[in-house]
Image (cartoon, rainbow, N blue to C red):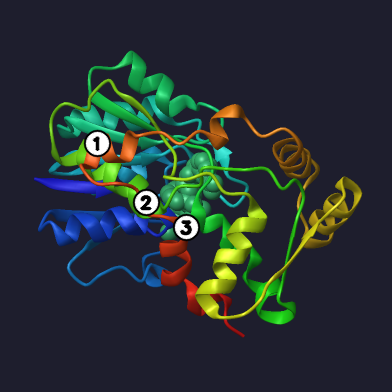
Amino acid sequence: MTILVTGATGTVGRQIVAQLVARGERVRALTRNPAAARLPASVEVACGDLSKPQSLAPALEGVTALHLITVGGDDQAALQTGPELVELAAKAGVTRVSVLSSWDESSVEEALRAGEIGWTQLLCVEFMANALEWAPSIREEGVVRVFGDNPGAVVHEADIAAVAVAALVSDGHAGESYLITGPETLTPAQRAQLIGEAIGREIRFEELSEAQYRASMEAWGAGEELIEFAVQLGANPPDAASVVLPTVEQVTGRPGHTFAQWAAEHAAAFRS
Ligand SMILES: NC(=O)c1ccc[n+]([C@@H]2O[C@H](COP(=O)([O-])OP(=O)(O)OC[C@H]3O[C@@H](n4cnc5c(N)ncnc54)[C@H](OP(=O)(O)O)[C@@H]3O)[C@@H](O)[C@H]2O)c1
């Protein structure tokens, strides 16, 4: 049995690949650019683009389980190719699918809902890894600047991956829609403090005004739509963002990783 992981070079996908390899599963990893993929040697790397479904046909040969992402390209646009991807997967003999959904549903979830393959939806609000965006200002100035110091139950990407792996290798997850959050609720200021503890440096926390935040995103080159989305998220995060849920423990049998653990693992990224 071969498991195909799409988004395999991404934050969550790399963890899924690593965990499947550790279990001794046969893994094929999809990327648009195999030369830059930096995947483990035991992983078969397949070239393909989710926005060009036919490019996935060779990668799907012999595949029985499939992990899918739902956005593609540098602008993270929702994939329009769900029906073709699901049809190809069904033809190839895929029997289990896990889907890492984005903020809005895409044609991928729609096509899976209309099809016959058993699939599991993974819904997340905020990854711990988003704190890597703070790495440059922490390294250079010892400061974190954030718009909206709202509490969030951020989730470790290894825990999202562990839920995906359970859905890919075992029965009992088809038809489930798992909302996955982390084991504690922390504001960005508290997360900044935990990063400071991990690297042994005091980190200042500065809350940006909306105007400052908009200006910083513009300077970084973000488009109008992304800026609007980020401002709304900072000002009015969804209620689900701050709710600690037992999903990780229920599905994997162990509690989710804490932010302190995540910060210790990623300390090198924050050290100057
Ligand atoms: N960050 C958060 O807090 C958060 C919260 C909820 C949901 N999410 C969702 O989680 C999903 C995954 O995020 P991530 O952070 O793990 O990913 P990521 O680190 O941003 O990586 C993106 C991945 O997508 C692949 N990719 C992009 N376009 C592709 C295409 N056209 N065809 C094939 N592969 C393509 C890239 O592969 P190659 O470049 O190697 O081809 C890469 O592996 C996203 O849908 C995001 O919206 C994120």
Q: Amino acid at mark 3?
A: Phe
Side (left or right) of 127 relative to 94: right
User: In the rendered view, does 178 fall on the left or right side of 106?
Assistant: left
Which residue is painted at 56% across and 36% down in the image? 242
- Which quadrant holds the N terminus? top left
Q: Identify the element where label 2 is drawn.
A: loop
Q: Quadrant of the image for the C terminus?
A: bottom right
Q: Position of residue 208 (x, y in %)?
A: 83, 54
- Which amino acid is tagged 2? Gly
Residue ID for mark 3: 259
Q: Residue at x 71, y 48 (%)?
A: 149
**Of marks 1 and 3, which one's residue comes earlier in the chain?**
1
Dot 2 or dot 1: first in sequence order is: 2
Residue pointed to by mark 2: 48
Q: Residue at x 40, y 52 (%)?
A: 157
Q: Earlier in the sequence, mark 3 or mark 2?
A: 2
Q: Is residue 259 visible?
A: yes
Residue 93 found in image quarter: top left
In the image, is residue 115 above or below residue 35?
above
Identify the element where label 1 is drawn: helix
- Which dot marks residue 251? 1
Location of residue 68 in the rendering, given as x and y in whole percent from the top left corner? 35, 40
